[in-house]
Structure formats: structure tokens, C-alpha cells
């Protein structure tokens, strides 16, 4: 630290650097450097949130453990300067690539209800009835022929007509951790005597912490590029810029300003003695 920084207290520079890495602006706030705290927070978070919003909240992606594809690692390296979100993405990647993250017939441990939106294709009597199915899914755990299972009913409307559909014990749910706000649901529909009358498919909301920051599958990434077009690449640039800017903020929190705050007021060096 140069003598020109004697009037600036960096407190504990290492702690300030860690805080600045985890939450841009927090390290400078800890040092009571309020203007720079606001400046870094506004610029870095502004760029980061802009990129995330433009990307439909899917720009934050971390590679799997042992992943050696250089483009994937490079993309993550550009955004990992914003600490907490990047660490969360690593955690989500670990959950996503876990062998336990698979489609399941055991989704909850107690009776639960979810808003449901989907499609039903039913046959009742001599006719068929199919169309949009909107309503509430009521599910509860049960025992199936091969172990734990789920059963329930859907109360709502089928093509605008009030209906209640009883579901078999084969209600299946998408993998719990995915970069999608909804979970796909499939089930067989039963009549009042327990006979098969058709199929129900739809979606229920996925918990925020189970989709935010989760990696994309190949199919999802292809759809993402197709839906957003050029805005997908622009969104990634905003997130990368935020990560790279925060590296400068961390450096400033640890080492202080690049130029001493008293540089302008330093006493100029004495001129060399005149020679005869």
C-alpha cells in the first residue's frame, strides 16, 4: 500500500475482497466507500440482471463436475465473477447431474395440491372427450404394484365444462431439478369403477429454487436459441460483462484505488541542485 493511501482505510482488505466477490458493492460498503459501493453495485448488478432478464433467466449455467468441453467452461468463467449466483449455479449443476434427479412416481410425502394446466384425452361410454384441462391437481402418496406411487384427482374444467378426473396410481412427474418453471405430469384417468378411460398430461409449477440456475439439456438449449435468437447471445454478453467488471471491483476492494487519493496534492520533488 502506497503512502498516498494513508487517509483511506481499507479495513480488512481480504474480507472486503470476499464480500465484493460474493455480492458486488458489499465490499466497498464494508469499507465505507459509499460512492464506489453504489457505482459498482449499480453497474455490475444492472448488467447482470439485464442479461438474465433478456435470457429468460437461463443465462446462469455451470458445467458438470469433470466437464472438459472448453466452450462450456469458458462461458461459465466469464460469469463466475459475480460470486453468489455463480456459486449457486455450481450447486444447481451438482443437483442436476445427480443420479437421483430423474422422473419419479414419488413426488411428495403428504397430500398436496398444485395448479394444473394441460390436456386430457378421455373416452366415456361410446364417445371420446378431449381438450384443454385446467384446474387443481390434488395428489397424495400411496403404494403401487412396484413400490411408492402417487394418486389423486384433478378438479377443474375440460373444454370449459366442469369436471373431476380420478387418476390411477401411476402419476409420473418430470425430474425435480430442471431449467423449466413447470414440471410435466402424466397420468392415466379412471372411471368411477376403476376402469381406464384415457390419459391426462400437463404441467404444475416448479419451485423457484429447483429451476433457477439449473443447466439446460441439449434439447432445451436448442429451443432457447431458437426462441430468443440473437438476444440469447446479447444476454450472455451482459452477464459476462458483469462477471468481468466484478473482478475489477474485487481488486479495488483489496488493493485500493489504482491511483492514490492524495496524488493531486503530493508535494513535487525538489529540483536537482544547479550546476555551475
Image: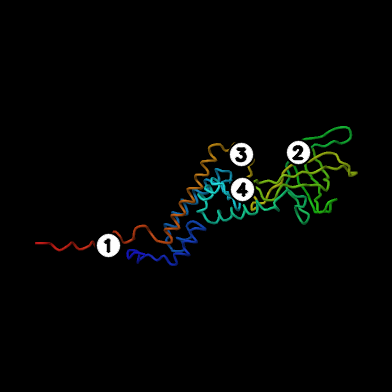
Label 1, residues with CA under 10 Å away: few <14, some 14-19, many ≥20: few
Q: Earlier in the sequence, mark 4 or mark 1?
A: 4
Q: CA distance from mark 4 to mark 1?
A: 53 Å
Q: CA distance from mark 3 to mark 2?
A: 25 Å
Task: Please state the horizontal and vertical placement of residue 230, each as a whole percent of the image.
Answer: 53, 37
x and y percent of residue 266 in the render? 27, 62
Q: Which residue is mark 1?
A: 266
* Element marked by disc 3: helix
Q: Secondary structure at mark 4?
A: loop
- Dots 3, 4 in contact, CB < 8 A: no
Which quadrant would residue 9 be assigned to in this image? bottom left
Mark nearer the N terminus (1 vs 2):
2
Q: Are marks 3 and 2 in contact (CB under 8 Å)?
A: no
**Earlier residue among tags 3 and 2:** 2
- Looking at the rendered image, the disc whose residue lies closer to the viewer, 4 or 1, is 4
Report the side of 56 relative to 171 (left or right): left
Q: CA distance from mark 4 to mark 2?
A: 28 Å
* In front: label 1 or label 3: 3
Q: Considering the numbered disc 1 on the image, is that residue within a helix, a strand or a loop?
A: loop
Residue at position x 43%, y 60% from top? 253
- Residue farthest toward the right in the current orientation of the protein: 193
For label 2, the crowd category at 10 Å Cα-Cα, with few meaning under 14, some 14 to 19 and many 20 or more, is some
Residue annotated with mark 4: 215
Left or right of residue 101, residue 237 in this image: left
Q: Which residue is mark 2?
A: 119
Residue at the spot of label 3: 222
Marks 1 and 4: in contact by CB < 8 Å?
no
Amino acid at each position: 500500500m502506497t503512502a498516498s493511501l494513508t487517509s483511506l482505510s481499507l479495513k480488512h482488505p481480504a474480507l472486503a475482497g470476499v464480500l465484493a466477490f460474493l455480492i458486488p458493492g458489499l465490499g466497498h460498503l464494508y469499507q465505507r466507500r459509499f460512492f464506489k459501493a453504489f457505482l459498482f453495485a449499480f453497474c455490475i448488478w444492472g448488467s447482470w440482471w439485464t442479461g438474465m432478464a433478456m435470457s429468460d433467466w437461463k443465462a446462469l449455467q455451470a458445467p458438470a463436475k469433470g466437464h472438459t468441453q472448453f466452450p462450456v467452461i469458458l462461458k461459465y468463467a466469464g460469469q463466475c465473477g459475480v460470486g453468489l449466483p455463480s456459486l449457486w449455479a455450481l450447486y444447481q449443476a451438482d443437483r442436476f447431474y445427480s443420479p437421483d434427479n430423474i422422473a419419479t412416481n414419488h413426488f411428495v410425502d403428504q397430500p398436496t395440491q398444485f395448479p394444473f394446466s394441460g390436456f386430457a384425452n378421455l373416452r366415456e361410454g361410446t364417445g371420446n372427450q378431449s381438450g384443454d384441462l385446467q384446474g387443481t391437481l390434488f395428489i397424495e402418496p400411496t403404494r403401487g404394484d412396484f413400490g411408492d406411487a402417487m394418486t389423486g384427482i384433478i378438479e377443474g374444467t375440460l373444454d370449459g365444462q366442469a369436471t373431476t378426473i380420478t387418476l390411477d396410481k401411476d402419476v409420473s412427474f418430470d425430474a425435480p431439478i430442471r431449467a423449466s418453471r413447470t414440471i410435466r405430469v402424466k397420468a392415466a384417468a379412471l372411471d368411477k369403477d376403476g376402469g381406464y378411460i384415457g390419459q391426462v398430461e400437463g404441467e404444475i409449477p416448479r419451485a423457484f429454487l429447483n429451476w433457477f440456475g439449473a443447466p439446460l439439456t441439449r434439447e432445451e438449449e436448442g429451443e432457447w436459441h431458437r426462441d430468443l435468437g440473437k438476444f440469447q447471445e446479447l444476454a450472455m454478453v451482459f452477464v459476462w460483462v458483469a462477471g468481468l467488471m466484478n473482478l475489477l471491483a474485487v481488486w479495488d476492494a483489496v488493493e485500493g484505488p489504482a491511483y492514490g487519493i492524495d496524488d493531486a496534492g503530493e508535494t513535487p520533488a525538489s529540483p536537482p541542485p544547479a550546476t555551475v
